[in-house]
Image (spheres, rainbow, N blue to C red):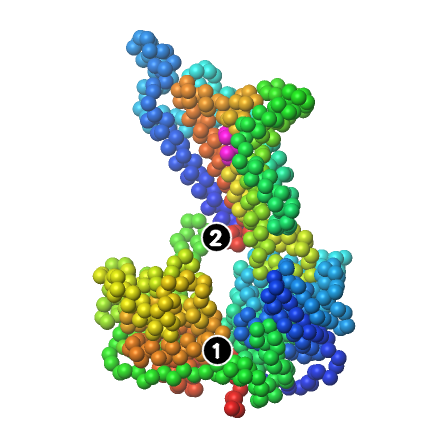
Amino acid sequence: MLAYLTRRLISLVLSLAVASAVIFLVVEVAPGDPASYMLGINAQPETLAALRQELGLDLPKWQRYLAWTTGMLTGDFGTSYTYRAPVAEIIGERLWISLPLALFALTLAVLLAFPAGLIAAATRGRAPDLGVMAFSQLGVAIPNFWFAMLLVLGFAISWRIFPSGGFPGWQDPLLALRALTLPAVALALPQAAILARVLRSSLIDALGEDYIRTARAKGLTRTQTLWRHGVRNALIPVLTIIGLQFSFLIAGGIIIEQVFYLPGLGRLIFQAISQRDLIVVESTVMLLVFAVILVNFLTDLAYALADPRLRRT
Amino acid sequence: MRASSWQKSPGGGRRPGAEPPLLDIDALTVEIQGTRILDSVSLTIAPGEILALTGESGSGKSMTALAAMGLLPQGAVASGRITLDGTDLLSLPERRLCDIRGRDIGMVFQEPMTALNPVQSIGAQVSETILQHAPRTPRAEARARAREALHRCGLDLPLSRYPHELSGGQRQRVVIAMAIALRPRLLIADEPTTALDVTTQAQILGLLQDLTRTEGMALMMITHDLAVVAGMAHRIAVMQKGRIVESAPTGQLIARRDHPYTRALFEASGHQPHLPPRPDSGALLQAQGVTCTYPLPRPHPFAAHPRFTAVDDVSFAIGRGERVGLVGESGCGKSTLTRALLGLTPIAAGGITLDGTPVFTHHRPNPQVRRKVQVVFQDPYGSFNPRHRVARLISEPFHLLPDPPRGAARAEAIAEALTAVGLSPDDAQKHIHAFSGGQRQRLAIARALIIRPELIVFDEAVSALDVRVRAQILDLIADLSASYGLAYLFISHDLSVVRGITDRVMVMQKGRIVEAGPTDRILSAPDHPYTRTLLDAAPRLPDLVP
């Protein structure tokens, strides 16, 4: 188990190093000089040079890469060209919306998908299964921004239970959660549908295994067999999907953030790219990469907990 | 426990049968979607009795066992009566059946590799049987009883072990421990040793026999292997197409074989193909000091991979037209050696030449050599792509030729190969699902024959076949060796299979060939203790009086 952990950790660090180099190069190679973009096309060459010097754009590439990465390690993400504020601060503010939103949505998705998947697998081919399959098909097919607008129409405009958009801040946690509820539901629905289908098929595979028959021969009921021997064996593919979904939800809520007017990470990236705010783009992307790699690492740990066979490799 | 102890006492000691039956199956009929799977099956088992249920695959043996467990597949309709000690099982509600399963009837399955839950420790799985039927048992006591059940099955391992850390034989002991933990009155064992090596098989059969003797447990033993049956059962019931065609005490049934089907089964089991004499001429394959290794998991992330030596300095030769057997238990390296001969696994040291040309040149298999060696695998179901027609399937080896035949020449080659294995040229247009297991194995042989190889490797090629089909395929293989002048390498874990089909046999243990010589000599007077162990452990049919 210790060897497994060490190997995973080494791969985590290496992935981060490679990712940072790739991100830096891609952003550098992309056309567009941030200084000339900021000053407009009529800028004097001297002012441009002064700004480039101020931003550190005149230094050699490797020095800028080194400064960027070592800065990030100490929590200094540099200063945004356009916001004129420390990037760490800007990202921090946005993260306080995107991260809770992603967690909220994922929790909802899991809470919805597990019972649905279990019921579907246990009643395979009969009415409850067909119902779950039909609904999940719908859930995968409906675009989430459209579903979000329906939610707003219903819960914010007709019934006025939840706000239709905006974010009041975390001073009043209850109010903040209310503001995040509709976006979280809109994000969770397709994820729950996917998760329920994966869980169902994975459980059905597990239920066809020989050890399920062995368990039945011991005197376990169908339900006991499903819970004690089916679920844990079906968990690996489900964990994989949950890991992927969380990574996606952290930044993938960009359209939903737009619909609900939430100042989250997705919108930050979108704005930074259109304004050539290289430092913000680089740092946010790096942060997202870090989040994905970290989630993968945690997923690997969850695998090992779920399946003893993985612990020895 | 002596490896062969189980064989010595069929019917020996107290002969049960006088007591009222424990399990009484009366006119059991099972239908699935209108198809009759079991047709009026009747049998009884008395306490302490071993009843063997035998027959070919699809005859309804397993279905009878599942019916007794109340575990018939969904959609199966059963009629008739199954009583256990007077209780009618067929009319019991599911809840009551759950109480009976595991407590009164235990069951052991064929595949020890998959019968255990991979993510639970063996201790948890054995104590689950105990806790299921007495939920208030304290954990510690349940574990103690689980340890005791494992001990009775001859397994003294820590309870925290997981199935993947155990060998096949050890896993089967865990499965048996789960089934007997509550000392059930009836144990149903469905092909419990079919997936095991002969020496392990002997131990497991001995264990099952001991359990019936010491605990008065009745045993329903399902097996296709008549030699196993003959060695241990008190009574034998022979099944064919969902019916019991003959049922009698073991000695009587073997001596009389009243039903023609029983007679055919016994004859096929003892069948010896007639091997034409070998044309004596020169060497074909030469293996010199062949060594193959595999990387093992690293002990820590910065260590070099330790290597496992699967084949260790093996040298041998196969002559033109010579039929050679390679025998050994699972894990002895015979599969790795085969793969090396076929150029599928690189060798770490040594060399293999065919007709003087190396199989590997610069670490790449040589196509010139490869087309002279073809292979037939064990599983006739898994080794064909179900989407292609037979013509395409069996002509696949043509890609090894620099100038493969086309058009009429290709069709002719396909027709000839099909005819050679006893099929019709018309079969070329069919898909593989239209063929039975035995026919598929014929197709596999046709695929090997089609480019006129000099050597065919048979990798457990008849192990998965029913006895009568196996006898036919062995005859076919014997005939082909003469008509095509073929050399064979016949790989098997079972010494009895290579008898009669090989001129010479090599016995492999732990990556080395420990003994080699003429088949008759090895089978009658083995030198090496390991060969003797294998021979002793192999179940034998009694001599049949015609």
Q: Are marks 2 and 1 in contact (CB under 8 Å)?
A: no
Which residue is pictured at 40% across the width and 32% down the height?
A20
Judge whether residue A247 is colored magenta.
yes
The region drawn magenta spans A246-252
Identify residue for label 2: A313
The circle on residue A218 is: none
- Between B378 and A280, which is closer to the camera in this rendering? B378
Q: Vertically, is B316 above or below B32?
A: below
Helix, strand or loop for disc 2: loop
**Chief secondary structure of the magenta portion:** helix
Q: Is residue B509 above or below residue A92?
A: below
* Image quadrant in which you'd find residue B98: bottom right
Residue at 53% x, 59% y: name it. B164
Residue A102 seen anywhere in this rendered image of the structure: no
Within the image, what quadrant is residue B156 found in? bottom right
Residue under disc 2 on the same chain as residue under disc 1 = no
Q: Residue under mark 1: which chain is it in?
A: B
> Which amino acid does the dot numbered 1 rest on?
Arg
Q: Chain of mark 2?
A: A
Give the alpha-carbon distance from disc 2 to disc 1, as whole Å: 44 Å
Kind of residue indicated by mark 2: Thr
Residue at 66 percent across and 70 percent down: it is B29
* Disc 1 target residue: B468
Residue A158 placement (x, y as % from top left): 66, 21
Can residue A168 be found in the magenta stretch?
no
Which is closer to the viewer, label 2 or label 1? 1
**Residue A309 visible somewhere in the drawing:** yes
* Left/right of residue B134 with respect to residue B253 in the rendered view: right
Please give the name of the residue rendered at 71% of the width and 57% of the height, measured from the top-left corner.
B139
Q: Return the residue found at the far bottom.
A: B545
